Amino acid sequence: MQTIEHELAQVEALMQQFIVTHTNDEQLQESMRYSVQAGGKRIRPQIVLMMTEALGGKIDWNTYRAAAAIEMIHTYSLVHDDLPAMDDDDLRRGKPTNHKVFGEAIAILAGDGLLTMAFELLSHLTLPSKDSLHLIRLLAESAGASGMVAGQAGDILAEEKQISLSDLMFIHRRKTGKLIECAFLFGAILAKASHEQQILCHQLGQEVGIAFQIRDDLLDVLSTTEELGKVVHRDEALQKSTYPQLLGIDGAKAALNQRLQHANELIDQLSLDMAKIQPLQALIQRLQID
């Protein structure tokens, strides 16, 4: 694998090119590109690339397409999540949210466009049909009515309510975790990993997915708008149950560290070459909060 920056640049270029060549309305295209160009950590495409490489797979245009498709789904979810009917946010990644720039109607349609385009992009995979269908079905399940969309619904319905820790985790396993699990499994499938390795990757995705949400909840409390690139203390304003609220700051930090420790143990169980797995370990390490 070349540097992760080089590989992510290929994914970025692919997303931009695909939007331009497959969108025939100028303002819709501009709106879709606005949110994709806003950047972000690109955690999900990084995981696809890193897992494919770590498990002995080849980084090629199929890998880039799979990574781009997941990021398009993630970006669409943020566009819709920021809408007045959802979390009603004005900032995303340090820039005005899509609906603040293009209006609510175009923002909704831009999200719709990114959602459907992700599957259009996956239809361009040059893999055996069985593998292509597996990836398409997995992304649909992860993003849809038993995955991320269901988690978003649960999150909205839990506003202004005090829910249990187990209920909160059930929401977040779907809202945040499912797409991260999908990224780990995409890497395993693209690398033609064994059934046992795919099970470990699924478990690894579950741990990282919950860890990522705990970290997000903590940053909403501990960070600033300038540092985070979005308005902080939104969870409190929307009266959402969060890990810091239910466990306290120290308890949430301990829960985060426990998830990351479990993730590292699962990586060890994969018994992979240390040089190949190091980028993934470094990514997980960056999720820690002191």
Image: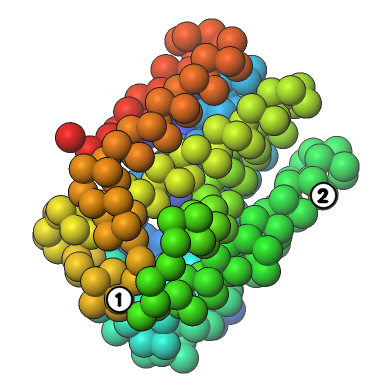
In the rendered image, the vertical position of residue 242 relative to residue 252, given as above or below = below
Tell me where residue 215 appears, x and y as whole percent.
31, 47
Residue identified by numbered label 1:
239
In the rendered image, the vertical position of residue 208 relative to residue 68, given as above or below = above
Q: How many marks?
A: 2
Label 2, secondary structure: give it: helix
Tell me where residue 119 appears, x and y as whole percent.
69, 60
220 sits to left or right of 22: left
**Is mark 1 in CB contact (under 8 Å) with mark 2?**
no
Cα gap from disc 1 to disc 2, whole angstroms: 40 Å
Label 1, secondary structure: give it: loop
Tell me where residue 91 appears, x and y as whole percent.
24, 72
Tell me the quarter of the picture where residue 183 sits: top right
Amino acid type at mark 2: Leu
In the rendered image, the vertical position of residue 268 relative to residue 40, given as above or below = above
At x 54% / y 75%, what residue is drawn?
Answer: 153
Residue identified by numbered label 2:
133
Q: Is residue 135 visible?
A: yes
Q: Earlier in the sequence, mark 1 or mark 2?
A: 2
Q: Is residue 60 visible?
A: no
Q: Nearer the viewer, mark 1 or mark 2?
A: 1
Q: Residues within 10 Å of mark 1 (few under 14, many from 20)?
A: some
Amino acid type at mark 1: Gln
At x 46% / y 39%, what residue is drawn?
Answer: 208
